[in-house]
Amino acid sequence: MPMDRTAPAETTALAAEVEGLMNAPEPDGTFRDSRECAGAVLLLGLLLAAPPTPRPKTDTK
């Protein structure tokens, strides 16, 4: 009965790959300053609260 001797080598390689992926450094993220976010929210609020643009009056005669 033949024995499969490749399984332990594949298991070792797979375990090493999994460990490498788990210990990988996290990529640098882009974080926004809270003042920048507050300014954007304030600008959005001002735009939403602004009165609509005036429209020309229609002649009803």
Image (cartoon, rainbow, N blue to C red):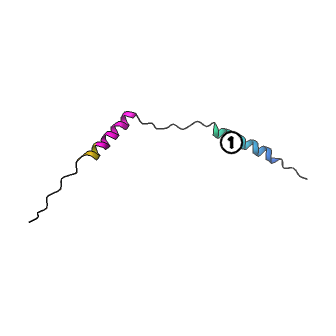
User: Can you tell which quarter of the image residue 39 is in?
Assistant: top left
Q: Main secondary structure of the magenta part?
A: helix
Asked if the magenta segment contains residue 44, the reply would be: yes
User: Can you tell which quarter of the image residue 31 is in?
Assistant: top left
Question: Dot 1 corresponds to which residue?
Answer: 17
- Label 1 CA crowd tier, 10 Å (few <14, some 14–19, many 20+): few
Under circle 1, the secondary element is helix
- In the rendered structure, the answer to whether residue 13 lies left or right of residue 23 reads right
Residue lying furthest right: 1
Q: Residue at x 79, y 44 (%)?
A: 8
Q: Is 18 above or below relative to 4?
A: above
Instruction: Residue 19: give x, y in percent of width and height.
Output: 68, 38
Q: Residue at x 30, y 41 (%)?
A: 43
In the image shown, does 43 or 1 lie closer to the viewer? 43
Instruction: Residue 20: give x, y in percent of width and height.
Output: 66, 38
- Residue type pointed to by label 1: Glu
- In the rendered structure, the answer to whether residue 46 lies left or right of residue 21 reads left
Total marks shown come to: 1
Instruction: Residue 18: give x, y in percent of width and height.
Output: 68, 41
Q: Is 50 above or below relative to 57?
A: above
The stretch in magenta equals 34-45
In the image shown, does 44 or 27 lie closer to the viewer? 44
- In the rendered structure, the answer to whether residue 49 lies left or right of residue 11 reads left
Instruction: Residue 16: give x, y in percent of width and height.
Output: 71, 40
Q: Residue at x 76, y 44 (%)?
A: 11
- In the rendered structure, the answer to whether residue 2 lies left or right of residue 20 reads right
Asked if the magenta segment contains residue 4, the reply would be: no
